[in-house]
Image (spheres, rainbow, N blue to C red):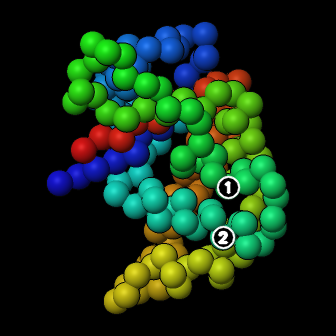
Amino acid sequence: MSIHLHLRAVAESEIRDDHTWLAAFMSEAWDNHPDEYAAGIADSINKVWGTVNDLYAAADVLDTDADEPWTLPIYGGRPVPHSADADPSNPPLMLLEPPGVSQAAAFLATVSFDQLWNVAGGKIMGPGRDEAQARQEFLNYHRDLLGFYERAASAGHAVVKAVWA
């Protein structure tokens, strides 16, 4: 089974704060994901987004910023609750508003991947994995997220997040 965290940048004025509407929007965006990824308005992480968050949590060890901006790229935002008549099979959704998107972009631009990896790499890589391969995988996730959030912040966009299983 494949499970993904799907991130989609969108102008805040184009979003309805309604789970059913957002689920339909994200479903269509998921269908168009390869094109939207190529256009720089979408990103996704297969299965290991919680581990990517664990990598960013190492920033708490490096710098005890009370705002904890390291939480924003993966789990940041507010849950969009299901309405009473919503389809229960619709995915969990989060909405990170433009100020949070800017904070996530700033965090990703200023944090040192190497320092994060030095603190957390051994813990998140798992047993039996080649360290160089694992490091490259997480560096790729970091670079993708950095570019995605920088573009979204530049455009003043919000980010909608969905989990697809």
Q: Residue at x 81, y 65 (%)?
A: 64
Q: Quadrant of the N terminus?
A: bottom left
The image quarter containing residue 25 is: top left
Q: Is residue 63 left or right of residue 28?
A: right
Q: Is residue 119 left or right of residue 21?
A: right
Q: Is residue 104 left or right of residue 46?
A: right
Whether label 1 touches label 2, CB < 8 Å: yes
Q: Residue at x 68, y 40 (%)?
A: 150
Furthest residue to the bottom? Answer: 128
Q: Is any atom of residue 39 visible in this view?
A: no
Write down the residue under mark 2: 58
55 vs 16: above or below: below
Is tag 1's residue or tag 2's residue first in the polypeptide sequence? 2
Q: Residue 52 location in percent, x, y?
A: 51, 62
Q: Residue 111 location in percent, x, y?
A: 75, 62
Write down the residue under mark 1: 70
Residue type, mark 2 in image = Ala
Q: Is residue 157 left or right of residue 144?
A: right
Furthest residue to the left? Answer: 1
141 vs 125: above or below: above
Q: Residue 92 location in percent, x, y?
A: 37, 35
Residue type, mark 1 in image = Trp
Q: Residue at x 36, y 16 (%)?
A: 83
Q: Residue 165 location in percent, x, y?
A: 24, 44
**SS of the residue under disc 2:** helix
